[in-house]
Image (tube, helix red, strand yellow):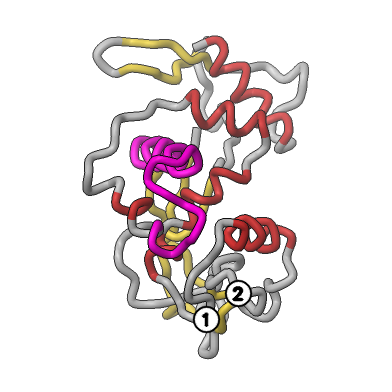
Amino acid sequence: SEDFKNSLINFLRNASLYNDGDECLWDIVHKEPFGRCLVAKRDIQVNELILYDKPLLIGPRVNNYDKIFCVSCYKILPKLTLCEAKCKFPVCHDCVDSKQHKKECELIRSWGLRNVNRYSKHLFRALTVIRGLLLSADDTKLMFMMACHDNSAQQNLEVERILDEFEGLTGDCETVQTLKKISSVLNTNAFEVGIAFDSHPEHTISLRVSIN
């Protein structure tokens, strides 16, 4: 628990949400039968701020969608097109050159995509898991320190369904095993959030968010 706490504080520090010298009002302890718990170190005053946090990973959720949206800004646009670099992800014009998309686009293409001109709903739904491969070394360490329950065969489908999309991925390769481990972390820790946009309030989408 102490190692996890130190890694979490380092994550918050890098996100400018924690400064050295700040009073830490919480601690992380292991309590049966609950497991890892966040507990107060002293009495908390009314309206006192305890903790700022931010998602470690965010992206499309696995469940079926009735909308396709930009994988970078998540906006639903009337003419959303696939990435011109042929990573098969839907990306809007404003985000096609974004730093975030370029990194995941290069990773996806390095695996040897098949049918590059065809949209893949399975690849779209696995994007949040794939983004786990692009975390920094410190954030990857934190991710794999999080509680993790073994995936069921059904839950592993989000990774297994993308294997046919690539020449360079097989079920027993190290990358796929790592993706399944990331999937397990997400299935244990992630939750669903809904977002809407002021310009199109009727367009609400759900995202998969992993917190610490």
Relative to 108, does residue 4 appear above or below in the rendering? above
Q: What residue type is labelled 2?
A: Lys
Kindly identify the residue that appears in the image at 77 percent across and 19 percent down. Answer: 20
Say few, some or many: other residues with alpha carbon within 10 Å of mark 1 (under 14 / 14 to 19 / 20 or more).
some
Residue 86 disc label: 2
**Place of residue 122 in the rendered image (x, y in percent of width and height, measured from the top left):** 38, 64
Q: In this view, does 104 lie to the left or right of 77?
A: right
Q: Which amino acid does label 1 sit on?
A: Asn
Q: Is mark 2 on a helix, strand or loop?
A: loop
The residue that label 1 is drawn on is 117
Cα–Cα span, label 1 and label 2 = 7 Å
Q: Is residue 157 left or right of residue 99?
A: left
Q: In which image quadrant can residue 172 be found?
A: top left
Say few, some or many: other residues with alpha carbon within 10 Å of mark 2 (under 14 / 14 to 19 / 20 or more).
some
Residue 43 in view, yes or no: yes
**Place of residue 44 in the rendered image (x, y in percent of width and height, measured from the top left):** 51, 19
Q: Earlier in the sequence, mark 1 or mark 2?
A: 2
Q: Is mark 1 on a helix, strand or loop?
A: loop
| Residue at the far bottom in the pictured view | 79
Kindly identify the residue that appears in the image at 66 percent across and 29 percent down. Answer: 138
**Place of residue 161 in the rendered image (x, y in percent of width and height, measured from the top left):** 34, 58
Q: What stretch is highlighted in magenta?
A: 163-189
Front-most of residues 8 and 132: 132
Secondary structure mostly seen in the magenta stretch:
helix
Q: In this view, does 96 lie to the left or right of 164?
A: right
Residue 42 in view, yes or no: no
Task: Evaluate if marks 1 and 2 touch, with contact meaning CB atoms under 8 Å apart.
Answer: yes
Kindly identify the residue that appears in the image at 27 percent across and 46 percent down. Answer: 155
